[in-house]
Structures are given as structure tokens and as C-alpha cells.
Image: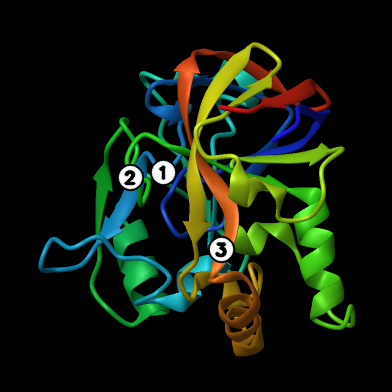
Amino acid sequence: MAVAVGRLLAIHRWPVKSLGGERVAAARLDGRGLGGDRAHVLVDDGGRTLTARQAPTMLRWRAAYPAAPGAALDPAAPPLPVLTAPDGRDWGWQDAGLPGALAADLGRPVRLHRDPAGRQDRPRTVLVTVEATRAALEAELGGGVPLDVRRFRPNLHVALDAPAFAEEGWTGGRLVAGGVELELLDPCVRCVVPTRDPDTARRWPELLRHLTARHGKRFGINARVVAAGLAEEGAAVTVRPA
């Protein structure tokens, strides 16, 4: 693998697992991952974590940390998020009516749970996606429907002088973005969640069928922070081989 260079196009954090998130100009990353990422979850009446796989309309809710924009968030102690319902109403995490509003919209009882360490599908990781791969996949699908990278719920979206799907060969390498260094683990195998529109939750099953047939369901790469620091949108990015 040759060294690849480029820049950090976007930083996304998802304060509540499986809800819509927010794009920020900067974020602090450490061994837990990206500060505040998936630090809150919804659980069902059996105590199991709910995701958009079980309740797709979760995607129509948004969560943000308005009290801690960008790098102001302390990764060890994220604030309580504010949730925005599909009808535009804002709910604080501690609002007594929030569980009922969620239950009415999702069609099931829910409880709120906070876990500052984060509830990533793969614990203590960061998901990196690559613009060349997003654009290539959009073209393969016919280009008629813009492929919003938010479908894949990344943390860092980068542009590099590397070909599409090059990240499938990056296992064991290192990615440096601004003041952060990541160990690159393995390509991310996708579930059905990317087939849902991130704003409407409408299904697009052809996306996963194509990704399965052509790319083994892989899109993006999992990574782990090995040198904590600050990442800022527009920062230089370097990917080095193992």
C-alpha cells in the first residue's frame, strides 16, 4: 500500500445510537472514540439496545449537543443531548415527556440510557469513510440517486489521492488527521441500516444487494485511536501502510 494523502472532509457524531446526528467543525478523539459519539441509547422494556434495524423511524429523530459544539465537548463527560422529533419539536434528554413521545412515534415502549464510553457496534472505534468510494458506489448504482454518506453513519469522511475501495487493503495501517492518529482495523461489513434514507427512513434495498454482490457488503473501515487529539474539518490526512 502506498502512502495516501488528502484532507478531512467532514466530522459526524451521533449522540444517540441510531438517531440522526450532527456534523461538527471539530471534535476531540481519544481511546473511547470520537467524543460524545453514541453516548446515549434507547432500550426496550427487556433492556435490549434499540437500533434502526428494529425501529427504522428512529432515523427521523435527530440528536445534538448544542451546549458543546465542536471541540468544546469533553470526551470523558459529554453533556445531555437535545432530541428533535420528526415534527420539529425539541426535547431535552431529561424531559419527562420524552420517553412517551418516542414510544408513540416508534410504536413501542422505550427507556433512556446514558453510557459516556459509547455504544458503537464495535466498542471504542471510529468509522472512516472515503469520498472516492462513495462517489464510485453512487456511479455503480446508476447515479440517479445521490448517495448521502450519512447512510453509513461515519465519524470521519476523508478525501484522498487513492482509488475507490482502496481502504479494503488498509488493515494494520495508520491514519493521521490533524492531531489524531488512528490504527486502521478492517473494512466495515454493512447491515440493512444504510438502505434507509437518513431523513425519511424510506427503504432502498437495492443498495445493500449491490454492495453485497460487488463488494462483500463492505463500505468504510473501522479504526481505533492510538494518539488522542483534536481533528478539524479541512485538516490534512495521511494514510500509511502497515
Q: Amino acid at mark 2?
A: Arg
In this rendered view, identify the residue nearer to me: 128 or 75. Answer: 128
Quadrant of the image occupied by residue 33: top left
Pointer 2 residue: 119
Q: Decide: marks 2, 1 in contact (CB < 8 A)? A: yes
Which of the pair 72/162 is nearer the observer? 162
Q: Is residue 203 visible?
A: no
Q: Circle 1 is placed at which residue position?
A: 38
Please, what secondary structure does the residue beneath circle 3 have?
Answer: strand
Q: Closer to the observer: label 2 or label 3? A: 3
- Residue at figure coordinates x 79%, y 81% from the top left: 141
Q: Which residue is mark 3?
A: 218
Q: Position of residue 54 (x, y in %)?
A: 34, 77
Q: Earlier in the sequence, mark 2 or mark 1?
A: 1
Residue at horizontal 65 percent and vertical 25 percent from the top: 70
Q: Residue 99: x and y, percent?
A: 30, 61
